[in-house]
Amino acid sequence: MVNEPNTDALTGKALLKKVKELEHLSREDKAKTCGYYTVTKNGVTRVNMMKFLNALIEAEGIQIDSTQTGNGRGGRSASYRITVQSNGNLLIGSAYTKQMGLKPGDEFEISLGRKHIKLKQVGDTENDEE
């Protein structure tokens, strides 16, 4: 009987309704009342705030976890913006190179415009605009 979880935890609309009814209680009391707690072997009740908050987020229909593709590793998504580093370099992150299927050694021509920098992959006939 080590950390026996409560299997009667509220979810979905029932959870949202109950939390509204309990607005006068603290977060911990709301979580406990909604069933998000465990009882240790010594009889101590522990409130599981993370499960409670995650259940609330899910009940609200908010998607936090992204759908994983590729090798399953997390990381930042491409924002399509970069910043000049303190040494004057522009770093193009791996999110962009992976998305384009680039490999080490691929070459680019750099053309400077008035307010833009354009990279054209050497040998790429598909994007020839001339």
Image: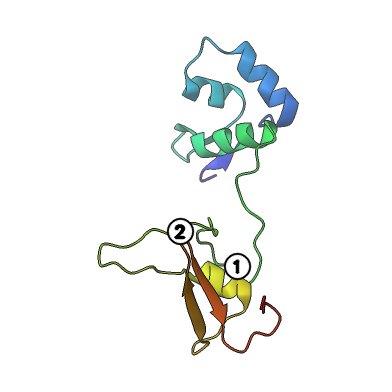
Q: Position of residue 110 (x, y in %)?
A: 47, 77
Vertical placement of 93 versus 3: above or below? below
Tell me if 32 is positioned left or right of 60 in this view. Answer: left
Residue at 66% across, 18% down: 18
Q: Are marks 1 and 2 in contact (CB under 8 Å)?
A: no
Q: Residue at x 68, y 85 (%)?
A: 125
Q: Earlier in the sequence, mark 1 or mark 2?
A: 1
Residue 100 locus on image (x, y percent) = 62, 74
Residue most extreme to the right: 13
Mark 1 vs mark 2, foreground winner is: 2
Residue 71 shows in this picture: no
Disc 1 is placed on an element classified as loop
- Amino acid under label 2? Lys
- Residue 22 placement (x, y as % from top left): 58, 13
Q: Please report the residue visible at 56 percent of the width from the left and 78 percent of the height from the top.
A: 120
Q: Quadrant of the C terminus?
A: bottom right
Kind of residue sitting beneath label 1: Gly
Query: 70 and 112: which one is in front?
Result: 112
Residue 15 drawn above or below residue 85 = above
Q: Nearer the viewer, residue 3 or 96?
A: 96
Q: Which residue is mark 1?
A: 72
Residue 74: % across, % down: 53, 62
Residue at point 52%, 74% (across, down): 119
The crowd level at tag 2 (other Cα within 10 Å; few <14, some 14-19, many 20+) is: few
Tag shown at residue 115 = 2
Residue 12 image label: none
